[in-house]
Amino acid sequence: MVLAGCGDGGGNTTTTRPPATSGQAGRGHGQPATGDGRGGVRLQPIGDFDQPVYVTQPPGDHRDLFVVERTGRVVVVHDGEPVSTPFLDLGPEITSAGEEQGLLSLAFAPDYGKSGHLYVDYTDTAGNTRVVEYRRSSSDPLVADPGSAREVLEVDQPYPNHNGGLVLFGPDRLLYVGLGDGGSEGDPNRTGQNLSILLGKILRIDPRPSGGRPYSVPHSNPFVGRSGARPEIYSYGLRNPWRFSFDPVSGALAIGDVGQDRWEEVDLVGRGKGLGANFGWSGYEGFDGFNDDQQAPNAVQPVFVYGHDVGCSITGGYIVRDRTLPSLYGRYLYGDFCNGQLRSFTAVPERRATDDRGLGLQVPSVSSFGTDDAGHVYVTSLQGPVYRLASDQG
């Protein structure tokens, strides 16, 4: 099972990489030095769950973690202990029959403390993607009101794989939605480069209702006003951006894009440079050409790739900013669903990574990473465990 997106095929590919561009990661004012990735980290157990795929926390909350289970529940970990009553149970609303389907992520509105609004991304019983808004219960802050559901977005899915599935508020307080190319394999419907289709893209919307519509599109989106293009699109040319993230220090956008037959890739661009960016699929897989009939003009090259002799399906993570983890500070942390290794490299936007190395930690069936409001990093295993990455000195 490869929930993170099915790197199809396997084979005996070679993990060769193009020559690196020189350059060092910059240090922001008052920021610690970039770590070397050489250990100093342990896995601190948080609990066992039913196929966990995400961990998050509302802004300003330092007590409650929210664990998303693919099978339909959001479980609260309150002061370190899982709460028996789920925060939200969408079991009847979803299908998790396909390996990449189910309840896939949760995002709290930036003003959650005041509005109580949260957003979930799931596969409905017809196999399509839905982004739905809920509100926190007025009587219990550890429960969402199931009657408050308001559909924000629905996207038809032609196949049960490559659904994407991440909803995430960016530094601009807008909602980003990751969508895969629609599935099967090889981009059969040629969605990645087609700007008239939402599949194979990262979208950017304001999820609040406006003008009788369930959401609005920022005027600064790159394809607003372009004939034949969907204005919701922020970035395109993606195969399955299962997990992406924004660096809270630099604003850089990092995408773990699950590969096809040969290459898993990480795309990393500086603040605002994801706006209108074409990441190449399916004209390219990694650095290699893929579908000859697909042109990808000015495609942004990945900063890092690895082959299917090493793993099979990248699980994108975060540029670590947890100061209690000096060896990982300023490095992009990621995993692979098949080999379970946690690895990292120095995160420099648009420059090829040269110092990728393992942490010496294994998480079987690593399905996702997450962070809390303090910047601590968590990792989930589809087999059940959730861990926090903690200093081995603590």
Image: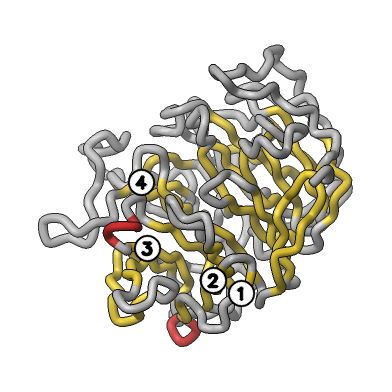
Q: CA distance from mark 4 to mark 2?
A: 28 Å
Mark 4 and mark 1 lie on one chain; the one further toward the N terminus is: 1
Amino acid type for the residue under numbered disc 1: Pro
Mark 4 and mark 2 lie on one chain; the one further toward the N terminus is: 2
| Residue 366 vs residue 295, the one in the foreground | 366
Q: Secondary structure at mark 1?
A: strand
| Residue 119 vs residue 204, the one in the foreground | 119
Q: Secondary structure at mark 3?
A: strand
Q: Quadrant of residue 352?
A: top right
Q: Quadrant of residue 225?
A: top left
Say whether residue 14 is visible. Answer: yes
Q: Which residue is mark 1?
A: 82
Q: CA distance from mark 4 to mark 1?
A: 33 Å
- Callout 1: few (<14), some (14-19), or many (20+) C-alpha neighbours within 10 Å? some
Q: Which residue is mark 4?
A: 204
Q: Which mark is residue 299?
A: none
Question: Where does the image place residue 96, in percent across and percent down from the top left?
Answer: 57, 78
Q: Are marks 2 and 1 in contact (CB under 8 Å)?
A: yes
Q: Are marks 2 and 3 in contact (CB under 8 Å)?
A: no
Furthest toward the top, the residue is 22
Q: Which residue is mark 3?
A: 118
Q: Which residue is mark 2?
A: 76
Amino acid type for the residue under numbered disc 2: Val
